[in-house]
Image (cartoon, coloured by chain):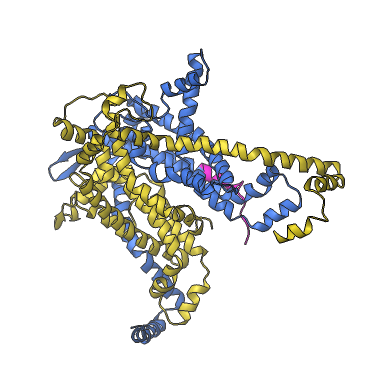
Chain colours: A yellow, B blue
Amino acid sequence: MQEKTTDSPKKLSPKEARRIRMQSMTREERGYVRRKEALEKVWPLFRFLILFGLSFVILYPLIYMVSCTFRERSDMDDPTVMWIPRNTTLSVLKDTIAAMDFWNTLKNTLLINIGCSLVQVLSCALTGYGFARFKFRGKKLLFGIVILMILVPTQIISLPLFFQFRFFGIKGVYTKNLIDTVWTMYLPAMTANGIRAGLMILIFRQFFKGLPRELEDAAYIDGCGPFMTFIRVMIPNALSAFLTVFLFSVVWYWNDYYVSTMFFYNTKTVATALYNLDNLLKMRVFGDATVQLTPREQIVWKQAGCLISIAPLLVMYVFLQKYFTEGIERSGLVA
Amino acid sequence: MSTEKAPESSGAQKKRRRGLSYERKKSLYGYGFIGLWLVGAIMFFLIPLGKSFWYSFNKISIEPGSLKLSWVGLENYSEALNKDPKYTDNLEATLLETLWKTPLIIIFSLFIAVVLNQKFRGRTLARATFFLPVIIATGPVFKIISGDMETSGNTGAAQFSTMFSTDLVGDLLQFLGVYGMSEKMTGFITTVADNIFGIVWSSGIQILLFLAALQNIPPSAKEAAQMEGATSWEYFWKITFPYVSPFILANLIFTVIDSFTNPMNSVMERILVFQNKEINYGLASAMAWIYFAIVLVSVGIITLIVNKFVYYEVD
């Protein structure tokens, strides 16, 4: 501010200054400056239009969800109702919460979700560190397995995996049925083989490769063993990467319905409850699983189900957005 | 606590150092770090993978307490390819869709990343919106909002898309004062709108990765370009593009795998029909393996081709 006020008396107006500057330029330079100025004026408007339009595409389903959740079923057939419901009601929301047994389901999901994500982040970090910093025989082959884990669709191995858990143990000696227990989720997560574990190992490997070696060398010289070095030096340095990967893991576990429907019959998670919402609703609301509803009539409940099942994620996203979007650049995928 | 432990551990190290070289010891620690994963990978990945491969050559029937396998050789494979018309159709459709959607997703997400990397008011909000699909698009919620109501026992019900249904596009056009469009044209616009939806919703992670790459471009490169008077267009091709090119490969592979392994794609759904409804595990495994082989080959080809054009900064 001060500079400007002191400069202004002896300086020309900006327009004049620009004219003089332009005169001193060659023709090409002038063209360049003009084009640049024009672009700088038009671009923000253009950018706003693009971003606004595309944001609409992303937000539309969410707005629609909210709009549907609070309207009565009859409003679905009212052509004048587009966004604002004619008859607002909470009954749809209540029905859906009851049908999904939402609070118990939520508790259940959080138990599986947060726990599995935690152990999986730790186990994947260990594995990633092993691959990033140590030389051992067969490392290339073993890392090939990690890549294979990323490439192989879960669907290929899900069936043998089911039987593995159904008759868990040593054949003929002792087997136990683990289906419908949380172990089907926890065991793979503990051993870095849960949902998208391959990707997480890869991320951690890249991340640890990117950290300077001096960090560990100092610890080694001080007489720390590799495991203690990992715990005392690497983990504190990797906290933001841990958090980012953990958040992604929570999202992936939350959204998983394929593995959960495979291993759980009675244990519900939010995703499987939503997946089976049709039948659950018919049982709770109409007391009859054979009721036929047209898809249009179901929409209010479906959308309400969608809304309550992503609400916890959305809340998490709003508060921790920074770690989702900024953490990834630090998490080493950039290396 | 630490003072107690320190001499102990260094003593143990000295003892071991007599027997093992430093290199050897370090490699043992390497196994120690990955050991947990290795056990899990054998139990929950390699054995099931092998079993599924084995299943694909067998007819499988369920007996109480176990599975009964009988060797049929390549019969399942020939059945999948020759006798089930839906499977090959779905396979073709999925491959084609991946083929044209992947480049579009990459181009779109790079563009959006470049835009979101600029400074403007409301940037945080815009970023938050564009990353929103990351937390939603992998779950059943996405299945519902993308208009697939056929799931969970509702088979045969008319599909109703809550997203850009034909009506909405038609209404919008009428609202804008466009009347008397030919049906072909409306159909075309609807497809485009549908696909924009699909592309926007499946580029969350890609945008995130590109954005991270863009933020890693050293400021010196930008300064140099400005000094030389590069236009934004030149800047994009000469600076931005080479710097993000390794990420194009990563994103390509990610996109392809994401689209191939998505439980919502039609091949996967076809496989699941045989796995869960018709209980023909052998056939389901064979289908899955054919599909997987195709995925592997395509990812391999992409890596080979794209690697030629990637610029790696030499440190």
- Report the residue at 39% width, 71% height from top: A231
Question: In the displayed structure, would residue A33 be above or below residue B163?
Answer: below
The picture places residue A69, in percent across and down from the top left corner, at 30, 35
As rendered, which of B138 and B248 lies closer to the eye? B138
Q: Is residue A46 above or below residue A121?
A: above
Quick check: B61 left or right of A298? left
Q: Is residue A299 left or right of residue A234?
A: left
| Quadrant the N terminus of chain A occupies | bottom right
Residue depicted at x 81% and y 55%: A9
| Above or below for A297 versus A257 | above
Residue drawn at (73%, 42%) of the image: A36
Image: magenta residue range: B301-315
Q: Is residue A60 visible?
A: yes
Locate the C terminus of chain A by quadrant: bottom right
Whether residue A138 can be seen here: no
When asked about the image quadrant of residue B273, the answer is top left
Magenta span contains residue B295: no
